Every structure is written in structure tokens, then in C-alpha cells.
Image (spheres, rainbow, N blue to C red):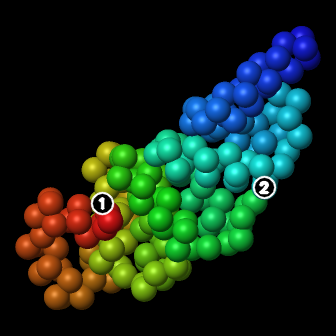
Amino acid sequence: MFGLFKSKIKVIRENADLGNADAQYQLAVMYEKGENGVEQNDNLAAKYFKLAANQDFGPAQLTLGFFYCNGIGVSKNYKEAIKWYRKSAQKGDIFSAKNLAVLFGQGLGCKQSHFMAYWYFGIAANFGDEEAKAAQFTIHEELLTSSELKKIEKIDGKTAMTLLFPN
């Protein structure tokens, strides 16, 4: 049985080294968790998540954002976390959107902005996330200024996307 894992890992590693984003992601997960006979190694996990993320692989972008946010296998860097969470959230990932809301709400890696936190929680809320709906409501009722509330009323979908996902 172990020989089967070894040959599967060999194929995954070969494909990862050839630039296959899915294989890079699979290998990264194995390193992250220490699975299938692969020794746990956060640095190699981060390396392979980054390779896959650079190829626009959404799940790798989410995880790389988490790694940067928490300093796992890379130096803690909230600006990099925001970069990768934005790429993933733009694909509709609610976890990335919620993480962005928290970072903006706390001003980690960016200027604190309850306004931006409100919008990022809104992405997750639009996908039915009840926790995000509650957080968005709280921000709306307790933290936004009257000028921010007026701005929200005037923003259309295209403007919101430009605001949330700048180049």
C-alpha cells in the first residue's frame, strides 16, 4: 500500500514541477498536513501554494492568504494576505471575503475601514453566509458614519467591484 502512495506522490511531484497548478496545490496540501508519507513542511507548503496561486488557482490563493496572515511558512505580511485574499474573493470565495472584512475592520495591512469591511462581508452575505450578514448589519448600524451610509446608497455594482478589487 505504501508503494502505491509513493508512486502517486511521485506523479504529483513530477506534474507540480512541470507547472501543473492542481498538482502544485495537491502537493502543497500534503506538505501542509504531512499526509500520504510526505513529511509536514510549512515552507514547502507555502512554496507550492504560491506556485499554484500565481497560476490563478483560487483555493491556493485563499490558503496563501491565510499563510501570510498567520506567518505560516512565510513571514507574516498582511498586505500580501490582502493581495491573495482579494484574488480568491474575486472568484467568489466567501472565506476570503470574510477574512478581508476582518483585516479591513481591524486595519491590518491597510488603513482601517469599516466601510470596506461592510462591503467584503456583503460578498459573503450575498452567498447566504449568516455570520457575514450579522457582521454586515452590525457594521451598518453601529460603525459607519452618516457620510459612509450615504456613499453606500449611491454606489452601483460596477463601482463596488472597482472599489473591492483594484488592479
Residue 50 higher or lower than 135, as above or below: above
Mark 1 neighbour density, 10 Å: few (under 14) some (14–19) many (20 or more): many
Q: Would residue 122 appear left or right of 62 to someone viewing this image?
A: left
Q: Is residue 55 visible?
A: yes
Mark 1, residue position: 122
Query: 5 or 10, which lies in front?
Result: 10
Residue positioned 35% across, 79% down in the render: 114
Q: Would residue 116 appear left or right of 63 to someone viewing this image?
A: left
Query: 57 or 109, which lies in front?
Result: 57
Q: Would residue 139 appear left or right of 97 to someone viewing this image?
A: left
Residue 104 falls in which quadrant of the image? bottom left
Residue 6 higher or lower than 140, as above or below: above
Mark 2, residue position: 43
Residue 81: x percent and y percent? 55, 66
Residue 6 falls in which quadrant of the image? top right
Query: 120 or 59, which lies in front?
Result: 59
Image disc number at residue 62 = none
Disc 1, SS:
helix
Q: Is residue 60 visible?
A: no
Residue 39: x percent and y percent? 89, 40
Quick check: marks 1 and 2 in contact, CB under 8 Å? no
Residue 32: x percent and y percent? 76, 45
Quadrant that contains the C terminus? bottom left
Q: Amino acid at mark 1?
A: Gly
Residue positioned 83% across, 39% down in the render: 34
Quadrant that contains the N terminus? top right
- Mark 1–mark 2 Cα distance, whole angstroms, equals 33 Å
Q: Residue furthest left?
A: 154
